[in-house]
Amino acid sequence: NVAVVLYTSDLRLHDHPPLRAALSSCDRVVPLFVRDRAVDAAGFAAPNRLAFLADCLADLDAGLRERGGRLVLRSGDAVAEVLALVRECDADEVHMAAGVSGYAHAREERLRSALEADGVRLYVHEAVVTVAAPGAVLPAGSDHFAVFTPYFRRWSELPPRAVVPAPRSVTVPEGIGSDPLPRRADLTGVSPGLPRGGEREARDLLTRWLRAGLSRYEDSHDDLAGDATSRLSPHLHFGTLSPTEAVQRARAATAPAADPGAEAFVRQLCWRDFHHQVLAARPEAAARDYRDRRDHWRTGAAAEEETEAWKEGRTGYPVVDAAMRQLRHEGWMHNRGRLLTASFLTKTLYVDWRIGARYFLDLLVDGDLANNQLNWQWVAGTGTDTRPNRVLNPVRQGLRYDPAGRYVHRWVPELAGLDAPRVHEPWRLPASERARYAYPDPIVELADGLDRFRSGRGAE
Ligand code: FAD
């Protein structure tokens, strides 16, 4: 008999419970990926992510071919395509990983009823995309945790799920047609420094990171120039790496001692699960305020011009501009950069978080509905931050997290000749020296930004 495995955000062979289950109950399996038109139409077809996806699909196909199988690619409506394939190969069952977004839930339901009508069973596997399934731990009287720390405590107590090995062989029925796989080289508009995708790359990166980066992580994860974070986020987003495996290997790498680097890294992976369980319970939070702070976000020509300057990295605040230029160049931004640029947009320019979140999704290779929208809401103070009115001062952030100015020098070459700490406040230079740097003055005074945020938030 035959099973179809529908791949979504889980493009791997290692630790893949749906593939494992399909192979244990059926002798032939069709690994399927559908280029879902609805996902593209909703604005998720950003060149950086499509390029990374192309790498991931090519690598998944190569991994399957090594095992005697191959990947089948189709395009269209995911439900219609699965149904057509099930009929084509006379499949008995379909396996997939559970998703968290409103769209993913609706797709599962549509698929379940369409398959049921054909007498085919759908198996939706939990805890594939995240370590813990949303809802695996719940506070009394609520359908999700709204505060991170108690969630982390309960999440840490969950018994670990056994990591599932990659299959040795996969047999795909004969005669199943596939669209040609996309190729990165065919795409335009891709950031020049975009990392490479695929499961092999993810596993190599994890191994290198555990060996060389993990022990420094706690002390240096906020160092903008040191770039001492794992850079695993695109792999976790596309599922070329299992988050469960990442947690277990981080702990094993430092066992038997509890290493502060490993624990800090695992805590960040828990943040990922935390935002996923919020989105699963509140799918509308992808677009609407999780907590309404009665914001009267600025609109109009001045706000639009300032937003453009923010996007292009010419706000006149060097660390903000450096981070925005890193985003454009690499399709990735350091977490500290994401925090301070998002705070600048929402609390200094006082522009709606949705505008910033949209721009990030257009560029980020790890752009993810749960992590992006809910981190933006966290920073904007409309989300789960318990201190919703905190404002990050970009000068102090620069002095603290880029003390030698190396991050600014790397991304804002106009200021390369200016030493730290002066590089974080070029407008303070004497006029004659200031004139040497072709770099804009601040588009807004920080004190004015603070005033408009304070008077706009909650104003009637
Ligand atoms: P590491 O520091 O090595 O952390 C390991 C992993 O933990 C990351 O790969 C990621 O999966 C997870 N993680 C770390 N921090 C967070 C966090 N705050 N929330 C959720 N998961 C986290 N992350 C995304 O994956 N996709 C996004 O679209 C995204 N948008 C963001 C937008 C804003 C405004 C902010 C403030 C943060 C956003 N993040 C997002 C979270 C975080 O910035 C990135 O996950 C991190 O910078 C990725 O780099 P890394 O893999 O080197 O992280």
Image (cartoon, grey):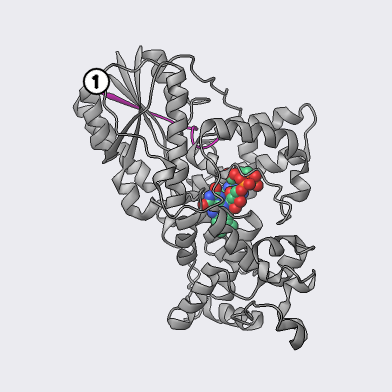
Q: Is mark 1 within 8 Å of ligand 1?
A: no
Residue 458, percent from left and from top: 51, 76
Q: Is residue 67 magenta?
A: no
Q: Is residue 411 above or below residue 393?
A: above
Q: Residue furthest bottom?
A: 431
Q: Could you tell me which residue is drawn at 60 percent across and 30 percent down? A: 245
Residue 56, percent from left and from top: 46, 36
Residue 428, percent from left and from top: 75, 82
Q: Is residue 400 above or below residue 60?
A: below
Magenta residues, start to end? 120-131
Q: Quadrant of the N terminus?
A: top left
Front-lying residue, 214 or 115: 214
**Amino acid tagged 1:** Cys
Q: Could you tell me which residue is drawn at 47 percent across and 31 percent down? A: 59
Tell me if residue 111 can be seen.
Answer: yes
Q: Could you tell me which residue is drawn at 59 percent across and 79 percent down? A: 454
Q: Is residue 396 above or below residue 454?
A: above
The quadrant in which residue 179 appears is top left
Residue 24, percent from left and from top: 42, 14
Front-lying residue, 13 or 59: 59
Q: Regarding mark 1 in the picture, which secondary structure is present there?
A: helix
Tell me if residue 147 can be seen.
Answer: no
Q: Could you tell me which residue is drawn at 76 percent across and 27 percent down? A: 255
Would you say 436 lies left or right of 186 here?
A: right
Label 1 crowd bin: few (<14), some (14–19), many (20+), radius 10 Å: many
Q: Is residue 125 magenta?
A: yes
Front-lying residue, 64 or 42: 64
**Residue on which the image places disc 1:** 89
The quadrant in which residue 81 appears is top left
